[in-house]
Image (cartoon, rainbow, N blue to C red):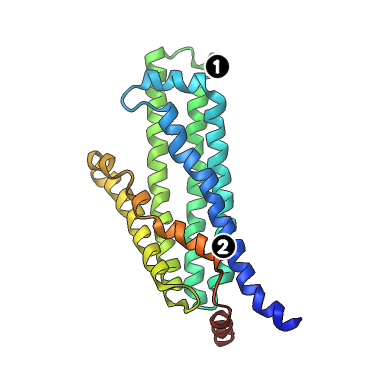
């Protein structure tokens, strides 16, 4: 019984981490892709404002989805720590730190969306503004929100580098997954820094992280379906003890 528990425990840890990672796919695309595509009209602040007012519940659901995504991200990185720490504890902690740095940035960034709702609420304190001024402020806060996502994207990219390295060096996971994770990290960084340095060009590469994120899809799928090579994981765990 003891032997069986020792054999299955690493695999179960991996599958829990994989399920949590895949859970991000339920929330992140909704808030990052679906909501903007439905409500935000680039270059047309008035139409965007009308869309948000007409679908306020949907807009609020996007905010909640973004906040849940952050919470799930915390659970993911803690679960992955348990799986990858036998490889190198220091680098595993670096992975955790990079992800956790993005947490306050991403959560506080949602204040920009709440500001949009406040501006469109018709509160008495806002009556000094004309409709055009309100629409301009709505556009400003939506742009700030997009910039906040690019700032957080730096750390979304950075945490993939130590993770990819750990997967590559682990011996209990396929090396190609580590390579794909590192490529995904470059995708996030290129998008973020391009948005800061060349904002016009950034529009043309907005989907770059999507194109380079195969590692973030295949890695959790592998964890869920295959888990880890238990013998190699335990060998690593004994060596690091």
Reply above or below: 135 against 241: above
Left or right, residue 41 beside residue 78:
left
Residue at the disc numbered 1: 123
| Towards the viewer: 57 or 110 | 57
Which residue occupies 42% across, 67% down? 177
Q: Quadrant of residue 176?
A: bottom left
Q: Secondary structure at mark 1?
A: loop
The residue under the point 45% across, 60% down is 218
Q: Decide: few, some or many residues near mark 1? Use Cα within 10 Å; few <14, some 14-19, many ≥20.
A: few
How far across and down, in percent of the image, does residue 183 sit? 34, 61
User: Residue 44 sits in which quadrant?
Assistant: top left
Is residue 78 visible in the rendered image? The answer is: no
Q: Secondary structure at mark 2?
A: helix
Give the residue drawn at x 27%, y 48%.
194
- Mark 2 crowd level (few <14, some 14–19, many ≥20, 10 Å Cα): many
Residue that badge 2 annotates: 224
Say if residue 169 shows up in the picture: yes
Q: Nearer the viewer, residue 166 or 222?
A: 222
Callout 2–callout 1 Cβ contact below 8 Å = no
Q: Is residue 115 left or right of residue 75?
A: left
């Amino acid at each position: 019984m003891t032997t069986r528990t020792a054999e299955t425990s690493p695999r179960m840890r991996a599958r829990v981490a994989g399920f949590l990672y895949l859970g991000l796919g339920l929330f992140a695309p909704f808030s990052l892709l679906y909501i903007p595509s439905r409500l935000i009209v680039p270059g047309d602040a008035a139409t965007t404002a009308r869309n948000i007012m007409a679908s306020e519940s949907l807009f609020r659901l996007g905010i909640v989805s973004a906040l849940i995504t952050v919470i799930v991200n915390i659970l993911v990185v803690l679960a992955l720590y348990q799986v990858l720490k036998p490889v190198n504890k220091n680098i595993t902690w670096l992975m955790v730190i990079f992800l956790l740095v993005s947490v306050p940035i991403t959560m506080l960034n949602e204040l920009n969306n709440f500001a949009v709702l406040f501006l469109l609420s018709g509160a008495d304190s806002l009556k000094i503004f004309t409709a055009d001024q309100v629409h301009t402020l709505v556009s400003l806060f939506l742009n700030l929100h997009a910039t906040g996502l690019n700032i957080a994207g730096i750390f979304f990219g950075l945490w993939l580098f130590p993770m990819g390295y750990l997967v590559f060096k682990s011996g209990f996971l396929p090396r190609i997954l580590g390579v794909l994770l590192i490529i995904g990290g470059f995708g996030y960084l290129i998008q973020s820094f391009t948005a800061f340095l060349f904002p016009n060009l950034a529009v043309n590469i907005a989907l770059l992280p999507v194109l380079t994120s195969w590692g973030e899809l295949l890695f959790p799928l592998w964890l869920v379906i295959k888990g880890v090579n238990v013998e190699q994981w335990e060998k690593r765990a004994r060596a690091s003890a």
